[in-house]
Amino acid sequence: MKDFKKYILLVAVVLFAVPLFAQDQTAAITAYNEARDLAQSKQYDAAIEKYQEAMNIAGELGADGEDIKSRSEKAIPKLYYSKAVDTYNGFRSSPSIPNLDAAIAEFEEAQKVGNDSGDTQIARKSQGILAQLNYQKGIMLFKREDFEGSEEALDAAIQINPNYAKAYYQKALVHKKTSPEDVDGIMSWFDQAISVAIQVNDREVERSASNSAHDELLFRGSKLVQDGKSSQAIELLEMALTYNEESADANYRLAEANNKLERYDSAISYANKALELEPGGSTDKAKIYFEIGIANQMKGNKGKACEAFTNASYGSFKAPSEHKMEFELKCESAEPSDN
Protein backbone atom coordinates (compact mmCIF):
# COMPACT_ATOMS: atom_id res chain seq x y z
CA MET A 1 0.00 0.00 0.00
CA LYS A 2 2.90 2.35 0.83
CA ASP A 3 4.54 1.56 -2.51
CA PHE A 4 1.31 2.36 -4.31
CA LYS A 5 1.09 5.75 -2.57
CA LYS A 6 4.69 6.52 -3.57
CA TYR A 7 3.85 5.64 -7.14
CA ILE A 8 0.80 7.91 -7.16
CA LEU A 9 2.95 10.75 -5.74
CA LEU A 10 5.65 10.26 -8.39
CA VAL A 11 3.07 10.31 -11.18
CA ALA A 12 1.60 13.50 -9.76
CA VAL A 13 5.02 15.19 -9.65
CA VAL A 14 5.77 14.18 -13.23
CA LEU A 15 2.35 15.29 -14.47
CA PHE A 16 2.76 18.60 -12.65
CA ALA A 17 6.32 19.13 -13.97
CA VAL A 18 5.33 18.66 -17.64
CA PRO A 19 3.03 21.72 -17.72
CA LEU A 20 5.67 23.77 -15.86
CA PHE A 21 8.32 22.81 -18.41
CA ALA A 22 5.98 23.68 -21.26
CA GLN A 23 5.18 27.01 -19.62
CA ASP A 24 8.88 27.87 -19.21
CA GLN A 25 9.61 26.95 -22.82
CA THR A 26 6.70 29.06 -24.00
CA ALA A 27 7.86 31.95 -21.82
CA ALA A 28 11.36 31.76 -23.29
CA ILE A 29 10.02 31.77 -26.86
CA THR A 30 7.62 34.62 -26.06
CA ALA A 31 10.40 36.72 -24.51
CA TYR A 32 12.63 36.04 -27.52
CA ASN A 33 9.93 37.07 -30.01
CA GLU A 34 9.13 40.20 -28.01
CA ALA A 35 12.83 41.07 -28.01
CA ARG A 36 12.95 40.78 -31.80
CA ASP A 37 9.93 43.06 -32.17
CA LEU A 38 11.47 45.62 -29.84
CA ALA A 39 14.75 45.48 -31.75
CA GLN A 40 13.00 46.06 -35.07
CA SER A 41 11.32 49.16 -33.62
CA LYS A 42 14.76 50.33 -32.36
CA GLN A 43 13.82 50.10 -28.70
CA TYR A 44 17.27 48.78 -27.99
CA ASP A 45 17.42 48.88 -24.20
CA ALA A 46 14.05 47.14 -23.85
CA ALA A 47 15.05 44.59 -26.48
CA ILE A 48 18.30 43.83 -24.68
CA GLU A 49 16.41 43.26 -21.42
CA LYS A 50 13.97 40.90 -23.17
CA TYR A 51 16.80 38.93 -24.79
CA GLN A 52 18.43 38.60 -21.38
CA GLU A 53 15.10 37.42 -19.95
CA ALA A 54 14.74 34.86 -22.75
CA MET A 55 18.32 33.73 -22.20
CA ASN A 56 17.81 33.29 -18.45
CA ILE A 57 14.59 31.29 -18.86
CA ALA A 58 16.10 29.15 -21.60
CA GLY A 59 19.13 28.51 -19.43
CA GLU A 60 16.88 26.68 -16.94
CA LEU A 61 15.58 24.35 -19.66
CA GLY A 62 18.84 22.56 -20.31
CA ALA A 63 19.35 21.18 -23.80
CA ASP A 64 15.76 22.04 -24.78
CA GLY A 65 16.44 25.75 -24.24
CA GLU A 66 19.84 25.84 -25.89
CA ASP A 67 18.59 27.22 -29.23
CA ILE A 68 16.78 30.21 -27.67
CA LYS A 69 19.68 30.82 -25.30
CA SER A 70 22.23 30.78 -28.12
CA ARG A 71 20.15 33.04 -30.37
CA SER A 72 19.65 35.54 -27.56
CA GLU A 73 23.33 35.59 -26.67
CA LYS A 74 24.28 36.31 -30.28
CA ALA A 75 21.64 39.02 -30.67
CA ILE A 76 22.68 41.12 -27.68
CA PRO A 77 26.12 42.34 -28.92
CA LYS A 78 24.61 43.23 -32.30
CA LEU A 79 21.94 45.29 -30.56
CA TYR A 80 24.56 47.25 -28.66
CA TYR A 81 26.30 47.92 -31.97
CA SER A 82 23.05 48.97 -33.66
CA LYS A 83 22.31 51.28 -30.75
CA ALA A 84 25.75 52.85 -31.16
CA VAL A 85 25.23 53.32 -34.90
CA ASP A 86 21.90 55.04 -34.28
CA THR A 87 23.54 57.34 -31.73
CA TYR A 88 26.22 58.20 -34.27
CA ASN A 89 23.56 58.95 -36.88
CA GLY A 90 22.04 61.33 -34.34
CA PHE A 91 25.41 63.08 -34.14
CA ARG A 92 25.56 63.35 -37.92
CA SER A 93 22.12 64.95 -37.96
CA SER A 94 23.08 67.36 -35.20
CA PRO A 95 26.89 67.63 -34.95
CA SER A 96 28.11 68.62 -31.49
CA ILE A 97 30.76 67.46 -29.06
CA PRO A 98 28.17 66.12 -26.55
CA ASN A 99 26.48 64.09 -29.31
CA LEU A 100 29.84 62.79 -30.50
CA ASP A 101 30.81 61.86 -26.94
CA ALA A 102 27.51 59.96 -26.65
CA ALA A 103 28.34 57.98 -29.80
CA ILE A 104 31.84 57.24 -28.51
CA ALA A 105 30.40 55.97 -25.21
CA GLU A 106 27.96 53.67 -27.03
CA PHE A 107 30.67 52.17 -29.24
CA GLU A 108 32.88 51.65 -26.19
CA GLU A 109 30.00 49.71 -24.61
CA ALA A 110 29.48 47.72 -27.82
CA GLN A 111 33.18 46.87 -27.92
CA LYS A 112 33.14 45.73 -24.29
CA VAL A 113 30.03 43.58 -24.79
CA GLY A 114 31.56 42.14 -27.95
CA ASN A 115 34.74 41.19 -26.12
CA ASP A 116 32.88 39.80 -23.10
CA SER A 117 30.55 37.70 -25.25
CA GLY A 118 33.23 36.48 -27.64
CA ASP A 119 31.72 38.34 -30.61
CA THR A 120 35.05 39.41 -32.08
CA GLN A 121 33.44 40.88 -35.18
CA ILE A 122 31.39 43.40 -33.17
CA ALA A 123 34.38 44.15 -30.94
CA ARG A 124 36.66 44.71 -33.95
CA LYS A 125 34.16 46.88 -35.85
CA SER A 126 33.49 48.98 -32.76
CA GLN A 127 37.21 49.46 -32.17
CA GLY A 128 37.75 50.66 -35.74
CA ILE A 129 34.91 53.15 -35.49
CA LEU A 130 36.14 54.38 -32.10
CA ALA A 131 39.46 55.37 -33.66
CA GLN A 132 37.64 57.32 -36.36
CA LEU A 133 35.31 59.04 -33.90
CA ASN A 134 38.13 60.14 -31.63
CA TYR A 135 39.97 61.48 -34.68
CA GLN A 136 36.84 63.33 -35.72
CA LYS A 137 36.56 64.78 -32.23
CA GLY A 138 40.17 65.90 -32.46
CA ILE A 139 39.43 67.73 -35.72
CA MET A 140 36.33 69.42 -34.30
CA LEU A 141 38.16 70.61 -31.21
CA PHE A 142 41.12 71.79 -33.29
CA LYS A 143 38.82 73.99 -35.36
CA ARG A 144 37.45 75.42 -32.12
CA GLU A 145 41.03 76.10 -31.00
CA ASP A 146 40.67 73.71 -28.06
CA PHE A 147 44.12 72.30 -28.74
CA GLU A 148 44.47 70.48 -25.42
CA GLY A 149 41.18 68.65 -25.98
CA SER A 150 42.13 67.96 -29.59
CA GLU A 151 45.44 66.44 -28.54
CA GLU A 152 43.71 64.21 -25.98
CA ALA A 153 41.23 62.92 -28.57
CA LEU A 154 43.97 62.28 -31.13
CA ASP A 155 46.05 60.42 -28.54
CA ALA A 156 43.01 58.20 -27.92
CA ALA A 157 42.66 57.55 -31.66
CA ILE A 158 46.32 56.57 -31.94
CA GLN A 159 46.11 54.34 -28.86
CA ILE A 160 43.13 52.53 -30.37
CA ASN A 161 44.72 52.27 -33.81
CA PRO A 162 48.51 52.80 -33.91
CA ASN A 163 48.36 52.63 -37.72
CA TYR A 164 46.05 55.63 -38.07
CA ALA A 165 48.25 57.85 -40.25
CA LYS A 166 45.85 60.81 -40.35
CA ALA A 167 45.86 61.05 -36.56
CA TYR A 168 49.66 61.42 -36.49
CA TYR A 169 49.48 64.14 -39.14
CA GLN A 170 46.85 66.04 -37.18
CA LYS A 171 48.98 65.67 -34.04
CA ALA A 172 51.75 67.54 -35.87
CA LEU A 173 49.36 70.40 -36.61
CA VAL A 174 48.20 70.49 -32.99
CA HIS A 175 51.77 70.44 -31.70
CA LYS A 176 52.58 73.33 -34.01
CA LYS A 177 49.86 75.32 -32.25
CA THR A 178 50.69 74.31 -28.69
CA SER A 179 54.50 74.36 -29.02
CA PRO A 180 55.34 76.61 -31.99
CA GLU A 181 59.04 76.84 -31.09
CA ASP A 182 59.52 73.06 -30.79
CA VAL A 183 60.65 72.42 -34.36
CA ASP A 184 62.03 68.97 -33.51
CA GLY A 185 58.72 67.96 -31.92
CA ILE A 186 56.68 69.18 -34.88
CA MET A 187 58.95 67.39 -37.33
CA SER A 188 58.81 64.23 -35.23
CA TRP A 189 55.02 64.05 -35.63
CA PHE A 190 55.26 64.73 -39.36
CA ASP A 191 57.88 61.98 -39.63
CA GLN A 192 55.67 59.52 -37.75
CA ALA A 193 52.76 60.40 -40.03
CA ILE A 194 54.91 59.76 -43.11
CA SER A 195 56.28 56.49 -41.72
CA VAL A 196 52.86 55.10 -40.80
CA ALA A 197 51.35 56.32 -44.07
CA ILE A 198 54.02 54.43 -46.03
CA GLN A 199 53.34 51.28 -43.97
CA VAL A 200 49.59 51.38 -44.64
CA ASN A 201 49.95 52.72 -48.20
CA ASP A 202 48.10 55.97 -47.46
CA ARG A 203 49.53 58.10 -50.27
CA GLU A 204 47.37 61.12 -49.43
CA VAL A 205 48.66 61.43 -45.87
CA GLU A 206 52.22 60.70 -46.97
CA ARG A 207 52.02 63.53 -49.51
CA SER A 208 50.29 65.97 -47.13
CA ALA A 209 52.73 65.33 -44.28
CA SER A 210 55.77 65.61 -46.57
CA ASN A 211 54.52 68.87 -48.09
CA SER A 212 53.65 70.31 -44.69
CA ALA A 213 57.04 69.38 -43.25
CA HIS A 214 58.79 70.96 -46.25
CA ASP A 215 56.69 74.13 -46.05
CA GLU A 216 57.27 74.49 -42.31
CA LEU A 217 61.04 74.21 -42.67
CA LEU A 218 61.08 76.49 -45.71
CA PHE A 219 59.12 79.17 -43.85
CA ARG A 220 61.33 79.01 -40.77
CA GLY A 221 64.52 78.86 -42.83
CA SER A 222 63.49 81.86 -44.94
CA LYS A 223 62.75 83.87 -41.81
CA LEU A 224 66.15 83.02 -40.37
CA VAL A 225 67.80 84.28 -43.57
CA GLN A 226 65.91 87.56 -43.23
CA ASP A 227 66.95 87.77 -39.57
CA GLY A 228 70.62 87.37 -40.49
CA LYS A 229 70.90 83.84 -39.07
CA SER A 230 72.07 82.19 -42.26
CA SER A 231 73.91 79.24 -40.69
CA GLN A 232 70.80 78.16 -38.80
CA ALA A 233 68.74 78.81 -41.91
CA ILE A 234 70.88 76.49 -44.02
CA GLU A 235 70.34 73.65 -41.54
CA LEU A 236 66.56 73.95 -41.81
CA LEU A 237 66.52 74.54 -45.57
CA GLU A 238 68.65 71.46 -46.21
CA MET A 239 66.18 69.50 -44.06
CA ALA A 240 63.37 70.90 -46.21
CA LEU A 241 65.00 69.32 -49.27
CA THR A 242 64.79 65.89 -47.62
CA TYR A 243 61.00 66.22 -47.78
CA ASN A 244 60.94 67.69 -51.30
CA GLU A 245 64.21 67.46 -53.20
CA GLU A 246 62.63 69.26 -56.18
CA SER A 247 61.86 72.42 -54.24
CA ALA A 248 62.92 75.47 -56.25
CA ASP A 249 62.13 77.73 -53.29
CA ALA A 250 64.34 75.83 -50.84
CA ASN A 251 67.24 75.85 -53.32
CA TYR A 252 66.78 79.58 -53.92
CA ARG A 253 66.78 80.34 -50.20
CA LEU A 254 69.91 78.19 -49.80
CA ALA A 255 71.58 80.26 -52.52
CA GLU A 256 70.58 83.43 -50.70
CA ALA A 257 71.87 82.14 -47.33
CA ASN A 258 75.18 80.97 -48.79
CA ASN A 259 75.73 84.33 -50.45
CA LYS A 260 75.30 86.03 -47.08
CA LEU A 261 77.93 83.68 -45.64
CA GLU A 262 80.25 84.43 -48.59
CA ARG A 263 80.05 80.84 -49.81
CA TYR A 264 79.69 81.93 -53.40
CA ASP A 265 80.33 78.61 -55.16
CA SER A 266 77.63 76.94 -53.04
CA ALA A 267 75.31 79.86 -53.73
CA ILE A 268 75.77 79.48 -57.49
CA SER A 269 75.24 75.71 -57.26
CA TYR A 270 71.97 76.05 -55.34
CA ALA A 271 70.80 78.87 -57.60
CA ASN A 272 71.42 76.84 -60.75
CA LYS A 273 69.44 73.97 -59.24
CA ALA A 274 66.63 76.39 -58.39
CA LEU A 275 66.58 77.57 -62.02
CA GLU A 276 66.19 73.98 -63.22
CA LEU A 277 63.26 73.40 -60.89
CA GLU A 278 61.47 76.77 -61.14
CA PRO A 279 58.37 76.27 -63.35
CA GLY A 280 57.59 79.98 -63.67
CA GLY A 281 58.68 82.55 -66.23
CA SER A 282 61.25 85.34 -66.28
CA THR A 283 59.72 87.31 -63.40
CA ASP A 284 59.72 84.21 -61.15
CA LYS A 285 63.33 83.43 -62.05
CA ALA A 286 64.57 87.01 -61.58
CA LYS A 287 65.31 86.57 -57.87
CA ILE A 288 67.37 83.45 -58.60
CA TYR A 289 69.42 85.19 -61.29
CA PHE A 290 69.97 88.06 -58.87
CA GLU A 291 71.68 85.68 -56.41
CA ILE A 292 73.82 84.28 -59.24
CA GLY A 293 74.75 87.83 -60.15
CA ILE A 294 75.78 88.67 -56.58
CA ALA A 295 77.89 85.51 -56.24
CA ASN A 296 79.72 86.13 -59.52
CA GLN A 297 80.21 89.80 -58.75
CA MET A 298 81.86 88.90 -55.44
CA LYS A 299 84.00 86.27 -57.19
CA GLY A 300 85.15 88.87 -59.70
CA ASN A 301 83.40 87.23 -62.66
CA LYS A 302 82.14 90.45 -64.25
CA GLY A 303 80.88 88.89 -67.48
CA LYS A 304 78.84 86.20 -65.72
CA ALA A 305 77.59 88.72 -63.18
CA CYS A 306 76.42 91.12 -65.89
CA GLU A 307 74.67 88.28 -67.71
CA ALA A 308 72.93 87.16 -64.52
CA PHE A 309 71.80 90.68 -63.59
CA THR A 310 70.51 91.17 -67.12
CA ASN A 311 68.29 88.11 -66.66
CA ALA A 312 67.30 89.36 -63.20
CA SER A 313 65.92 92.64 -64.60
CA TYR A 314 62.24 91.81 -64.12
CA GLY A 315 59.62 92.81 -61.59
CA SER A 316 60.89 93.99 -58.22
CA PHE A 317 64.45 92.97 -59.15
CA LYS A 318 64.63 95.21 -62.23
CA ALA A 319 65.78 98.38 -60.44
CA PRO A 320 68.44 96.78 -58.17
CA SER A 321 69.79 94.73 -61.09
CA GLU A 322 70.09 97.79 -63.33
CA HIS A 323 71.81 99.68 -60.51
CA LYS A 324 74.35 96.86 -60.17
CA MET A 325 75.02 96.81 -63.91
CA GLU A 326 75.24 100.56 -64.42
CA PHE A 327 76.98 101.84 -61.30
CA GLU A 328 78.83 98.89 -59.76
CA LEU A 329 79.82 96.62 -62.63
CA LYS A 330 79.49 99.12 -65.47
CA CYS A 331 78.21 96.36 -67.75
CA GLU A 332 77.85 96.84 -71.47
CA SER A 333 74.22 97.33 -72.53
CA ALA A 334 72.47 93.98 -72.91
CA GLU A 335 68.97 92.62 -73.33
CA PRO A 336 67.69 89.94 -70.95
CA SER A 337 67.64 86.44 -72.41
CA ASP A 338 64.35 84.54 -72.71
CA ASN A 339 63.83 82.18 -69.76
Image (cartoon, rainbow, N blue to C red):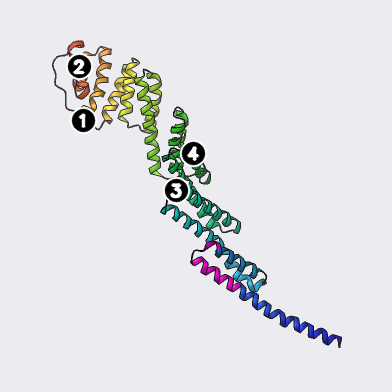
Left or right of 229, for residue 185:
right
The mark that comes first in sequence, 1 or 4, is: 4
Picture quadrant of residue 170:
top left
- In this figure, what is the number of numbered marks? 4
Q: CA distance from mark 1 to mark 2?
A: 20 Å
Q: CA distance from mark 1 to mark 4?
A: 43 Å
In the image, residue 29 lies in the stretch drawn in magenta: yes
Question: Which of labels 3 and 2 is toward the front?
Answer: 3
Please tell me which residue lies in front, 13 or 146.
146
Residue type at the position of mark 1: Gly
Q: Position of residue 236 (x, y in %)?
A: 40, 25
Contact? badges 3 and 4 (CB < 8 Å):
no
Q: Is residue 269 visible?
A: yes
**What residue is pinned by disc 2?**
306
Q: Classify the position of the N terminus by image quarter.
A: bottom right
Instruction: Check disc 1: other Cα within 10 Å, few if <14, some if 14-19, many if 20+.
Output: few
Contact? badges 3 and 1 (CB < 8 Å):
no
Residue type at the position of mark 3: Ser
The mark that comes first in sequence, 3 or 1, is: 3
Please tell me which residue lies in front, 44 or 226.
44
At horizontal 40% and vertical 37% (from top left) the residue drawn is 209
Contact? badges 2 and 4 (CB < 8 Å):
no
Q: Position of residue 74 (x, y in %)?
A: 56, 64
**What residue is pinned by disc 1?**
281
The mark that comes first in sequence, 3 or 4, is: 3
Q: Is residue 128 visible?
A: no
How would you classify the magenta stretch by its main secondary structure? helix
Residue 37, compared with residue 112, is above or below; it is below
Mark number for residue 96?
Answer: 3
Instruction: Check disc 2: other Cα within 10 Å, few if <14, some if 14-19, many if 20+.
Output: many
Magenta region: 28-45
Q: Classify the position of the C terminus by image quarter.
A: top left
